[in-house]
Image (cartoon, rainbow, N blue to C red):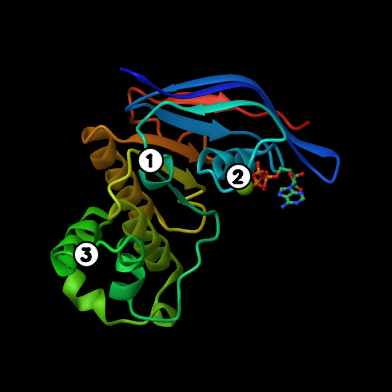
Amino acid sequence: MSQIFEIRELRKEYGGLLALDLPELDVASGDLVSLVGRNGSGKSTLLRMLAFLEKPSSGLLNYLGGPEPRREVTLLLQNPYLLKCSVFDNVTLGLCLRGDRENLPARYAEAMRAAGFADPQAMASRYSSQLSGGERQRISLASRIILKPRVLLLDEPTAHVDAASERMILDTVRACLGQGTTVICATHDRQLFSDFPTVREVELRRV
Ligand SMILES: Nc1ncnc2c1ncn2[C@@H]1O[C@H](COP(=O)(O)OP(=O)(O)OP(=O)(O)O)[C@@H](O)[C@H]1O
Ligand SMILES: [Mg+2]
């Protein structure tokens, strides 16, 4: 497998306070990495940098995937935000922002099924304010999967969902891995990926 991220001596400071200090991390294409560590150990900070939303204060963070990193890497935030519009519009927004409007209904349906919705059509015109927390989480996941990322970054995707939704989210991760997607997931649940033979645990230490 080819390498997709190379990290050396990576540091992030906020207002002079060190939030992350990661000496080394190599991630290969197709890897599943479970990012663990206590509250405040820098998991979300690392994911934001891997998604190019923030710059490191120092050190090396190399993306070795393809020529368009921002199109290839996507992050599901710890507290995902849904716009006050329909589920269909929320899920397809990323594609529309890219000017990629071809065949949206079919791609919407595919992403929603991958996120565990048996009847995507029934959800399409629902409003984000009418959804349960677990539904919101999986709809946010669908809005990332529809982009067909090479790297899927997940920040505590199962923190607020019940066992059934957790299984659906894990099925989605399994399907993504089956398609060669690299998955890096921050979680407090060290058992979350116990059924995934290839999972690699990376622990961040509070600095
Ligand atoms: N935008 C910011 N400005 C200032 N400090 C920040 C900012 N974002 C994070 N921090 C600090 O950086 C440290 C790491 O935070 P981060 O959110 O990455 O931790 P985490 O491992 O994701 O924690 P949790 O398990 O609670 O989600 C914390 O001390 C936090 O207060
Ligand atoms: Mg966090």
Q: Amino acid at mark 3?
A: Tyr
- The residue that appears at 25% across and 75% down in the rendered structure is 123
**Label 2 sits on residue:** 44
Q: Whole-percent x and y of residue 175?
A: 23, 41
Which mark sits nearer the N-terminus, 1 or 3? 1
Alpha carbon separation for disc pair 1 and 3: 23 Å
Secondary-structure class at tag 1: loop
Figure check: 120 above or below 178: below
Secondary-structure class at tag 2: helix
Q: Whole-percent x and y of residue 86?
A: 33, 80
Q: Amino acid at mark 1?
A: Glu
**Label 3 sits on residue:** 108
Q: Which is closer to the viewer, label 1 or label 3?
A: 1
Q: Whole-percent x and y of residue 15?
A: 84, 46
Q: Which label sits on residue 42?
A: none
Alpha carbon separation for disc pair 2 and 3: 28 Å
For label 2, being within 8 Å of ligand 2 is answered yes
Answer with left or right where residue 54 lies relative to residue 94.
right
Q: Whole-percent x and y of residue 87?
A: 32, 74
Which mark sits nearer the N-terminus, 2 or 1? 2
User: Answer yes or no: do the residues labelled 1 and 3 have beta carbons within 8 Å?
Assistant: no
Q: Quadrant of the C terminus?
A: top right
For label 3, being within 8 Å of ligand 2 is answered no
- The residue that appears at 58% across and 33% down in the rendered structure is 36
Hey, which residue is sitting farthest right in the picture?
16
Q: Amino acid at mark 2?
A: Ser
**Label 1 sits on residue:** 68
Question: Dividing the picture into quarters, in which one does residue 7 lie?
Answer: top right
In front of the other: 162 or 80: 80
Q: Quadrant of the N terminus?
A: top left
Alpha carbon separation for disc pair 2 and 1: 22 Å
